[in-house]
Image: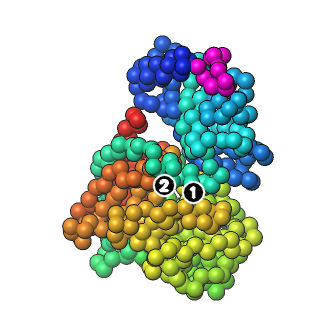
């Protein structure tokens, strides 16, 4: 254990720690990755969120933080010691130290993480926590995480944004996919990332392909292999269900499900007093499908029984956007009444009404982050919300998002993507990539083919798909993670 004087690390130890990190950063290449040059390891653990009461891993009397392990193979990894590397005390910023604890390494849909906890009394404003870890093959290394201490997640967000550096990001056009008869309005990847599904308006030309307003594209060959689905009407929003094998779309008076490989209609979901479904969403596991209607209602179906289970009422305008939380327990809806609403799926109870401040336009897009901690609403600009409390967290700069039509979170939690109008040419669209740690712009590209109405990240966060004009575009995302 390093020498400690009056509850603080000695100057000699601090100097050696800095040298270790500097040397290892060079030899390991990308900061935050696991590599094996001479069995020396040093990496950064990313701060995700401050846990609140009720969150998994929350400890009574402690302040707990979710920390994300970086890229690389962390299967079977263990955090051996935390903070000052011995004694169960955190010695950064306290006299005598505060009790600390850490959880086992676990995995969620975004990657590996663990929970770091310390006593909530006497904390400084910032925490620089250090850790020793061991990989499954017995190799050992050290990690560091720098994050704000705050009982309010919003305060943590703002402090982190003021001090973090934006990641360097490049968007490279991989392919332009053609085949839609009119404006492309919605794009989604299947959960395995192998297929990209897009939808469009029906168009005015009277020919056979005119009815193919949904297309399933093969991602592996950049859309050369494709399946046309004869939805036979304009489709502005659809859901992907049944483990990514089916698309659920609104028809005139019911919701239809189509097989993405055969293009055949394989099921109908009738609703009580159905009035032209405008948007459809499905849970990640495909167990529940929801549709927003022109008569302001939302209908939920159980996909096993194909029966409507609930009708949700509360909007005073047509429901035009829907999204389920990653765990399927919440549903968020956006309407032409310029508001979004949060619902409990099991009970159908309305939880919160979200009214973006200063917004007088319909909420056209609603999206959860992949860890479920943040909700984004898009109504000419992008607002972030806490889905548990319904409280506003942050807003992206409105001056950067004139005519914003969509927003998406990357599954790894690092990036966001938005669309807007190119102010130099109103016929062109603009895609902006945001660093979600700093809420700062990383890169933007202009789409000369027309306004971009939707975009989505691939499950591995390495590709972006966008839809606009009569085309779908696949972009490769290149991130420079070096600090």
Q: Which mark is residue 409?
A: 2
SS at mark 1 in the image? helix
The N terminus - image quarter: top right
Q: Position of residue 301 (x, y in %)?
A: 67, 70
Query: Measured along the vertical axis of the image, is residue 258 above or below residue 165?
Result: below
Residue at (54%, 38%) from the top-left corner? 146
Q: Earlier in the sequence, mark 2 or mark 1?
A: 1
Q: Is residue 245 above or below residue 342?
A: above
Instruction: Give the residue furthest to the right.
Output: 60
Quadrant showing the C terminus: top left
Label 2, secondary structure: give it: strand
In the image, taking residue 296 as reference, residue 301 lies left or right, namely right
In screen coordinates, is 260 left or right of 351? left
| Residue beneath disc 1 | 154
Q: Residues within 10 Å of mark 2 (few under 14, many from 20)?
A: many
For the record, the magenta segment spans 1-10
């Amino acid at each position: 254990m390093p020498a400690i004087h009056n509850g603080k690390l000695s100057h000699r130890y601090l100097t050696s720690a800095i040298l270790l990190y500097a040397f290892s950063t060079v030899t390991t290449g990308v900061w935050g990755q696991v590599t094996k040059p001479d069995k020396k390891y040093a990496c950064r653990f990313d701060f995700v969120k401050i846990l609140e009461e009720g969150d998994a891993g929350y400890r009574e009397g402690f302040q707990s933080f979710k920390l994300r392990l970086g890229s690389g193979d962390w299967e079977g990894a263990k955090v051996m010691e935390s903070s000052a590397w011995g004694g169960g005390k955190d010695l950064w910023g306290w006299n005598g130290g505060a009790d600390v604890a850490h959880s086992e390494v676990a995995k969620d849909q975004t990657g590996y993480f663990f929970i770091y906890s310390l006593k909530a009394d006497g904390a400084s404003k910032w925490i620089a926590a250090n850790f020793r870890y061991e990989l499954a093959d017995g190799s050992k290394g050290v990690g560091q995480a720098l994050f704000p201490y705050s009982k309010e997640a919003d305060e943590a967000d703002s402090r982190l944004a003021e001090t973090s550096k934006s990641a360097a990001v490049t968007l490279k056009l991989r392919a332009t996919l053609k085949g839609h008869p009119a404006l492309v309005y919605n794009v989604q990847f299947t959960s395995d990332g192998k297929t990209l599904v897009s939808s469009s308006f029906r168009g005015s030309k009277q020919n056979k392909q005119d009815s193919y307003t949904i297309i399933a594209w093969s991602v592996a060959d950049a859309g050369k292999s494709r399946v046309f689905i004869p939805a036979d009407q304009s489709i502005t929003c659809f859901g992907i269900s049944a483990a990514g094998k089916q698309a659920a779309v609104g028809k005139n008076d019911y919701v239809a499900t189509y097989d993405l490989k055969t293009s055949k209609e394989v099921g109908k979901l009738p609703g009580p007093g159905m009035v032209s479904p405008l948007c459809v969403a499905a849970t990640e596991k495909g167990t529940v499908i929801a549709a927003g209607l022109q008569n302001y209602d939302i209908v939920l179906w159980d996909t096993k029984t194909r029966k409507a289970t609930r009708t949700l009422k509360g909007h005073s305008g047509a429901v035009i956007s829907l999204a389920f939380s990653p765990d399927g327990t919440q549903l968020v809806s956006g309407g032409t009444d310029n508001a979004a609403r949060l619902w409990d799926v099991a009970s159908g109870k309305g939880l919160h009404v979200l009214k973006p401040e200063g917004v007088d336009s319909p909420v056209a897009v609603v999206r959860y982050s992949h860890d479920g901690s943040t909700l984004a609403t898009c109504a000419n600009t992008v607002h972030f919300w806490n889905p548990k409390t319904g409280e506003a967290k942050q807003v992206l700069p409105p001056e950067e998002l004139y005519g914003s039509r969509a927003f998406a979170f990357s599954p790894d939690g690092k990036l966001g993507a938005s669309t807007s109008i190119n102010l130099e040419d109103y016929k062109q669209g603009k895609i902006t990539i945001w660093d979600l740690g700093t809420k700062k712009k990383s890169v933007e590209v202009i789409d000369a083919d027309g306004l971009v109405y939707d975009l989505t990240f691939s499950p591995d966060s390495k590709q972006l798909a966008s839809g606009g004009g009569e085309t779908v575009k696949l972009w490769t995302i290149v991130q420079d993670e070096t600090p």
